Amino acid sequence: MNYWLSYLFIVILTAEFTFQATPICGQVVEHEFIIGDPLPDAPVLALRGKYQIGVQTIDLLNKNQIDILNTKDGKEAFYDRPLKVEVWYPSSIDTTISPIINYEDVLGIAGNAERPLIPFSFLGRAMRDAKAISSEGAFPLVIVSHGYVGSRFLMTYLTENLASKGFIVVAIDHTESTFSDAAGFQSTLLNRAKDILFVVDKFANLDAVGGNHFLSGKVDAENTAIIGYSMGGYGALNAAGAGYSEFALNFFKGMTGGSTALESRGTYSDEFKKSNDSRIKAVVAFAPWGMERGVWDEEGLKGLKVPTFFIAGSEDDISGYEKGIKAIYMGAVNADRYLLTYDNARHNVAPNPPQLATMKAGLHIDEYYRYAEPSWDERKINNINQHFISAFLGTHLKGEDYNEYLSLPEDSNEKTWFGFIPRSSTGLSLLHAVPQE
């Protein structure tokens, strides 16, 4: 009982801090719940870590890439592929202040007359362009990949939280796959894993550019995790070793006029086999897309050998559950893997909560259901995700002991899970399987 009383005391203090007025650019701004804040019943590892965090935007360019949207009749076109990324990192900000940042994103989908692009903004807990902490060496790297369509700001509740716990977190805007530049799906099919691996390389080699990067000496890319949602999960699994099936490669050819560009990510490709990246130590796959569409088969899934934490809704109507996400989990027989399931949830088990203030009359209902779950409070989902991902990445990237938070009864309704407030862990299940090799 003393443990829970202590925990409740911490949550109450956090809540009081959360509802304070905060200065922004010399002005005092009143605010209540900010995305990522713990609810009163948040599990213990959802609370922020010891670091204040900074955030910066970086523009990258992956040169001489296949331009699949302009490839015709099997003749490949090429372009320099731009990628905008957002980076959250431990900072040397004065710990007596509570920095607040204004993120800017859009609702809608580019080129969709029924869902026009509408700018909106929301608050987070970070400081723009703050100085990186200088006294604690390098931090593990986490790459975050959004869905189709999405943005680098889709999961700030998680990116901020992980940075506060000592990770360098890089979220990608995947070109031709964001709200603001959505284009043909074939670009996402081809580029998702390639974008992820390119960004890993860029951040692994920061010190090679002369040592003057703001994160020089701060990135431990030898301990890298990939977090992907939906099509981001599709790319994350492939980047970590799950090769695409022959069916998927033929499907791609059919929709691109015969292009073989995706074959470099196929199970039996020598290029794919050589691309295996030993720096990737863990994967978190939210509702990964593709299994019901034949993207993976038995042999392809055998290539996934890094520890993987799957997160799904039992009623996922985009990626599928029994024949989709759970089938991937079951087929990844060579990985130490978990499957966390939200009972009655659909596909939106990863994003920030919907911004109700932006849901103006007349907006398409899908702008709400881009973020919301019909049977769950998205803020509670966010807190549970923060908790489990902190335990999983802390285990595999930092070598910390979170076994008590991960070794749980399968059904959360039978007994309150360790780390949760009594009676608060209902509607969840957690499976765990060890590699067969």
Image: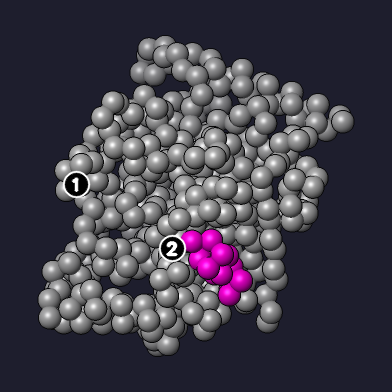
Q: Secondary structure at mark 1?
A: loop
Residues 198 and 322: in front is: 322
- Horizontal placement of 50 versus 278: left or right? right
Which labelled disc corresponds to residue 46? none
The magenta segment: 320-332
Which labelled disc corresponds to residue 112? 1
- On the image, the x and y values in percent for residue 171 come to 40, 50
Tell me: residue 7, above or below residue 79. above
Q: Quadrant of residue 71?
A: bottom left
Q: Which residue is mark 2?
A: 289
- Horizontal placement of 225 versus 265: left or right? right
Q: Secondary structure at mark 2?
A: loop
* Residue 126 located within the stretch drawn in magenta: no
- Horizontal placement of 172 versus 92: left or right? left
- On the image, the x and y values in percent for residue 358 come to 33, 28
Work out which quarter of the rendered image holds the C terminus and state it. bottom right
Q: Residue at x 22, y 66 (%)?
A: 63
Judged from this view, the residue extending furthest toward the right is 1
Q: Quadrant of residue 128?
A: top left
- On the image, the x and y values in percent for residue 90 come to 51, 40
- On the image, the x and y values in percent for residue 251 come to 30, 77
Crowding at dot 2, Cα within 10 Å, few <14 / some 14-19 / many 20+, comes out as many
